[in-house]
Each structure stands twice: as structure tokens, then as C-alpha cells.
Image (cartoon, rainbow, N blue to C red):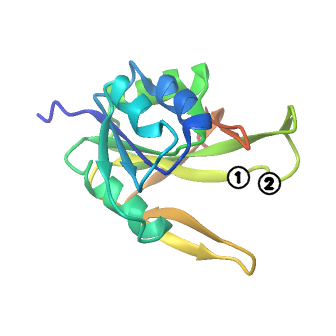
Amino acid sequence: MNNKRLAVAIITKNNIRTIEETVVSVQGLCDHILVVDSGSTDGTIEFCKSQGVEVAHRDWPGVADQKQFCIDACADYQWVLSLDSDESLDETLFEGVKSIVAENDSQYDGYSFNRKVWFMNGWLDNVFQPEFRMRLFRGGIAVALLKWRPSAQRERVAMTGSRCQVRWASLLAPVNMTLGLMPAI
């Protein structure tokens, strides 16, 4: 049996303002945290290393390629949790991911979470909601794709296999952003 249960994969550059909360929010949950950095000069690398995080440098090839590189580097883990460097888990999501990994239910290969956005001192409850993102999946099966919009590009993760939308928690993200889980629908 694979004893490598959960890796957290994060891509970043110059995100000291937000990555501290991201890293702290997954400590004690995972076996390994990998940060792929593309040249931070603001203390991001030093902070991550001080927390026992593996930091790999890779020049920026674009968001989807960088995310794929990071995900692929964690492919030998049973589960991979892919986070942006400004996303963090609240307590409910932390416990939910812990339970999912422990149960290792073969019925599902991936879980998407609603991403809650913190902006100007408050949660955006109506704008961009719900915004489900595939963030937790079995190692070796996910592909990071680019989704193009007229004004911006945004990656998304695709995978083969069955998936579940979690509706009992939310991923937190600052513009301050945070993630969380919810019961399957």
C-alpha cells in the first residue's frame, strides 16, 4: 500500500502576503507540501523553507504548464490537493479533506470545492458564487487546462474518473481567498 497519502501542490511567485496563511492552513493535514516558485524575491521562498516546505524553482511557462508540472511532481501520492498561493482551508474543509483521504473511497477520484472570496473586508456571497474548483484528486490523473476569457486566462483542472462536489465547506481565498467542503449533490 502507498504510504504517501496526501501532497499539497502550490505554484507561486512573490506571494509572501498570502502564502503564509495557505501553508499554515494545511500543516498537519498532508505528508508533503511542494511549492513550485518562479523567482520570488519577497521572502516567499525563505518562509516556505522555514516551514519545512519543499521549494522547487521553475521559470514561468504559463499558468497551466506550471500547475501541471507541480501536480505531476506529486503524482506518486494517493491524493493531491492543488491550491493557489492565496487560498487556504478553513477548519471545516481541513477536517473534510482529512476524512476524504482517510476513507479513500474508491467511488470518487476527485472533489471540487466552492471557493469563497474575501474582498474589501467581507465575503463575496453573491458575486462569483458558487465557484466550484476541482482541487482534490487522486495522484496521476489530473490535467491542468487553460480556460480563456476575453479579459483574462484562468486555469482549471480536468480529470478522468468520478468526481464529487463538496457542499459542506468552502475554500477561502483573499483577494483574501479560502476553500471549503459541502455534501455531495
Which SS class for mark 1?
loop
Kindly indicate whether the residue at mark 2 contacts the one at mark 1 (C-beta within 8 angstroms): yes
Position of residue 136 measured from the top left corner of the image (x, y, whole percent) = 44, 44
Quarter of the figure that contains the C terminus: top right
Position of residue 36 measured from the top left corner of the image (x, y, whole percent) = 37, 50
Q: Amino acid at mark 1?
A: Glu
Which SS class for mark 2?
loop
Residue at 42% across / 66% down in the picture?
Answer: 60
Q: Amino acid at mark 2?
A: Phe
Q: Compared with residue 126, is residue 25 higher up or lower down, i.e. above or below?
A: above
Image quadrant assignment for residue 176:
top right
Residue topped by disc 2: 128
Nearest the eye: 119 or 109: 119
Residue 64 in sight in this render: yes
Nearest the eye: 57 or 86: 57
Q: Residue furthest bottom?
A: 150
Count the labels in the image: 2
Residue at 42% across / 55% down in the picture?
Answer: 162
Q: Compared with residue 64, is residue 149 higher up or lower down, i.e. above or below?
A: below
Using the image, tell me which numbered label, if any, was put on residue 152.
none
Residue at 34% across / 54% down in the picture?
Answer: 70
Position of residue 129 measured from the top left corner of the image (x, y, whole percent) = 79, 50
Residue at 35% across / 37% down in the picture?
Answer: 105
Residue topped by disc 1: 131
Q: Compared with residue 65, is residue 89 higher up or lower down, i.e. above or below?
A: above
Position of residue 137 measured from the top left corner of the image (x, y, whole percent) = 39, 48
Label 1 – label 2 distance at C-alpha: 6 Å
